[in-house]
Image (spheres, grey):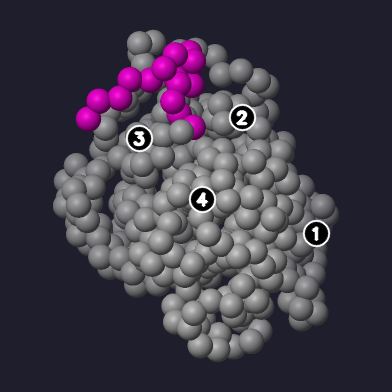
Amino acid sequence: MRMSETVPGPRVGPARPMPRLGDSWSDLAVRSGLLVARLSRSLGLGDGSNVGGRVSLALHPGALGRLAQGRRVVLVSGTNGKTTTSHLLAEALGTLGEVAHNASGSNMAEGVAAALATARDADRAVMEVDELHLARVARQSHPVLIVLLNLTRDQLDRAAEVRRTAAAVGRALAELPHTTVLANVDDPMTVWAAGHAAGPVVWVAADTGWRADSMTCPRCGRPLAERRSAWRCSCGLARPEPDWRLAGSVAIGQDSATPLTLNLPGPVNRANALMALAAARHEGVEPVRAAAAMGRVEQVAGRYATFDVGPHRLRLLLAKNPAGWAATLGMLRPGRPLVVAVNAREADGRDTSWLWDVDFGALAGRPVVASGERAADIGVRLSYADLPHRTEADPLAAVAGLPAGEVDVVANYTAFFTLRRRLAARA
């Protein structure tokens, strides 16, 4: 599929010439970043994945490009599922040899540079990339493949309108004639963006069931018509015929049918695994081999991890926007007590109005506690959903007030990682 209309906004400029990494200044930049990252870890200030890359790029703006040179780089981008899909893909490509991967989830240019610097000998790289930073990272890393998952609302004060994000992604893809794009046919925003790709496109049916951000056509603004899972607009934009799809838990490709047996819960993770399997096949991993490697993944950067805290066993889940919550609702066990923890720091987005688009009514029939720095906001939203609940800002105190046994904790970005660090420190 190709689209002839012009994507609005400025286009990505060409990369500037950069010195070789063997040059003393570029080597110094990379070594300085690695040193700062180690110092950050030793002082307990963080894992160093951002600050180390920031130092390297400040000293040498071309360090990312030179670190990527000579490797097969795969970028995984989109609003939801980047971390899980990139972990699954890294496991699959790991069957071929060492893979550089920003496993901590630091997905801007600094995090990508730091991950590449840490695995200098890896011939392959799998990097999750924030959708608003995809153009910068792709321009420097020259990926062989970009996996484009979905484009939905997220961090409303940073990315106020989904179509603008899709347009920015489309402009980036239009600059990459030697890059294959692997895109989700069930998200109209993603299809519109991928339709501007200068290189080939592989289409994957990775439906997550979320439609609220694509009720109208991203090309012309008219309402989209949907019939039997296929969508189309009168302007001609329509769901492409997929090259990959799911039949239950079996991944169907043009020349393969591969059962997916995952240790990760929910239909959304089968969709993520399908994207990862298609990407691994593009990179030369046989589907059966890739599926076996992905089946060994039990948690992803703390997601789905369990912790024993007194008489409670906590399971951690991350949901940071309405689409993420829609996927998470299908992972919750009926009747199991639930803590909902929400912060509104810079990394989360300061605007919490997205809470009103989450179907919290689906949580009926279980004890619920509103928690996190914005516990009051959650409490108001739960009240309007007619859900009995308690409000307790400290997530661990919230858990302590629940009946003994298993508890699900669903948190947004900084609430999730803050709680995970606290639980790890107690272990």
Q: What kind of residue is marked 1?
A: Val
Whether residues under marks 3 and 4 lie with C-beta atoms below 8 angstroms apart, the answer is no
Counting labels gives 4
217 in the magenta segment: yes
> Where does residue 237 sit, x and y in percent of width and height?
37, 18
Q: Residue at x 72, y 60 (%)?
A: 373
Whether residue 234 is visible here, answered yes or no, is yes
| Badge number at residue 113 | none
Whether residues under marks 1 and 2 lie with C-beta atoms below 8 angstroms apart, the answer is no
Residue 218 falls left or right of residue 345: left
Mark 2 or mark 4, whichever is nearer to me? 4
Look at the image and tell me in which quarter the C terminus lies.
Answer: bottom right
Mark closer to the chain start, 3 or 2? 2
- Which residue is identified by label 2? 161
Q: What kind of residue is marked 3?
A: Asp
Calculate the distance from the C-alpha at mark 2 to the C-alpha at mark 4.
30 Å
- Which residue is identified by label 3? 186
Q: Secondary structure at mark 4?
A: loop
> Where does residue 17 sit, x and y in percent of width and height?
71, 39
> Where does residue 1 sit, x and y in percent of width and height?
35, 23
Q: What kind of residue is marked 2?
A: Glu
Q: Residue at x 42, y 52 (%)?
A: 362
Crowdedness of circle 2 by 10 Å Cα count: few (<14), some, many (20+)? some
Mark 1 or mark 2, whichever is nearer to me? 2
Tell me which corner region of the image, top left, top right, bottom left or bottom right, holds residue 163: top right
Mark 3 or mark 4, whichever is nearer to me? 4
- Which residue is identified by label 1? 55
- Which residue is identified by label 4? 386
Q: Give, as a single range, the part of the protein colored magenta.
A: 213-228
